[in-house]
Image (spheres, rainbow, N blue to C red):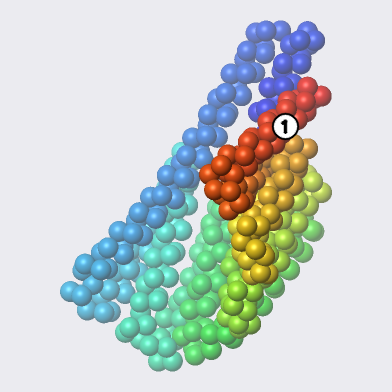
Amino acid sequence: MRDDVVVESAIERWTQTGLIGEDLAKRLRNEIVETAAGRSRRTAQYIIAITAGLVLLTASGLFISKSWPLLPTPVRTFILGGAGFALIAVGTAMEPRFRVRPVSYLLQASGLLMLLFAYAHSDQTWPKGTFGGIVAGMLALATPIISTVLSVRRNPIMPAVNAAVAYAFIAFFLDRIGVPEDAIVWILDGVLLVALAALVVRLRSAGPDTPNVATSLYAFVASMVTGLVLAGLTAAGPLSAGGGTVYALDLWLLIITGTALWANHRAPAWLKRPWYDDILAVCVVLAAVFAFLTLDELGVDSDWLGFGSALIGSVALLYGVRTGGQPVLLAGACAVVISVWHFGISQAGSLGAVGALVVTAALLFWVASQLGKTLDEE
């Protein structure tokens, strides 16, 4: 359950029992409001900064489409690379200012992606296997390493970003030295497993006073998310699984979900983070989507494709009621509504959808009543 909800409930109990006075309760509530407002502003900063980064990359694509034909090929590469370095430099300069720190992270991340575009475009001037192509590949390999070394002592966010994008840079390097595509995917899988093993050892041996624990934790989360992408690439590429690729995605998502559940309930105190519920909520949404694809791959009748999503959503709702995890509750509710809507439409047109939504509404009202009961018990 969110900390502000817990504290507000405690203040209410303390006031009713006379443990604290109304003046102190008012001051405490004002502090909760100010803290929550600051958290909301910070979230909004990240959302707007991510949007700005996407707009910037779109602008880069527009510039390429309009101006590219007028520029010599090597100049195009250096323009992209220069823009990438400029974004990283500006973001790094802004980072010490707490107020604009989310913007600085997104600028640096956008700069790394711009550098990746520059390295990829260099293939038109220096094809793979040539001396220039190999040099470009080595520079690409060095980029996330240097970026991590420079940022690891400043904050835990950029090393995690580097951990996520490093696999693209490694793939580019391997392609430039002539490694076959399937072999590249297997090598990336091996690098991922080694990285995850090293981070697990690091986190298991950490303690409350261990430095840079947050850096290792964030890098582990980024690597786990990257693993979902690599699982899909491995199944679709070297394994030629076709539609069965979704099974690999199911397996890796199950691993992520199990790890998040362990972290949320069994991890040591110094590894606890309030955003584990957010990760679980994302897992619920992805699981609901993958359930449709999995049942379709298994040949289940189209009318029943939403059954898996409904089951996942119901489990998420029960988990959210039990733990007070609001993000998981919301994700579970969305999964149930979408699956029931799908079933209602497929079975009896709009009239069936009405009945299905009535059932869904009843379920959600029950969940709401259970939440109220939980608050009374607290």
Residue 272 against residue 30 in the figure, above or below: below
Q: Nearer the viewer, residue 89 or 301?
A: 301
Residue 18 picture location, percent across and down? 78, 8
Q: Measuring 55% from the left and 25% from the top, which residue is drawn there? A: 34
Residue 216 picture location, percent across and down? 67, 58
Residue 326 seen in the current view? no
According to the image, label 1 marks what residue? 366
Q: State which quarter of the image contains the C terminus.
A: top right
Residue at disc 1, secondary structure: helix
- Hey, which quadrant is residue 221 in on the image? bottom right
Q: State which quarter of the image contains the N terminus.
A: top right
Q: Measuring 66% from the left and 69% from the top, which residue is drawn there? A: 299
Q: Measuring 73% from the left and 68% from the top, which residue is drawn there? A: 197
Identity, as a three-letter code, of the amino acid under mark 1: Trp
Q: Is residue 251 left or right of residue 123?
A: right
Q: Residues within 10 Å of mark 1 (few under 14, many from 20)?
A: few
Residue 169 picture location, percent across and down? 50, 73
Residue 80 against residue 50 in the figure, above or below: below
Residue 327 against residue 18 in the figure, above or below: below
Q: Measuring 56% from the left and 42% from the top, which residue is drawn there? A: 351
Residue 263 picture location, percent across and down? 75, 51
Q: Nearer the viewer, residue 64 or 332?
A: 332
Residue 240 against residue 211 in the figure, above or below: below
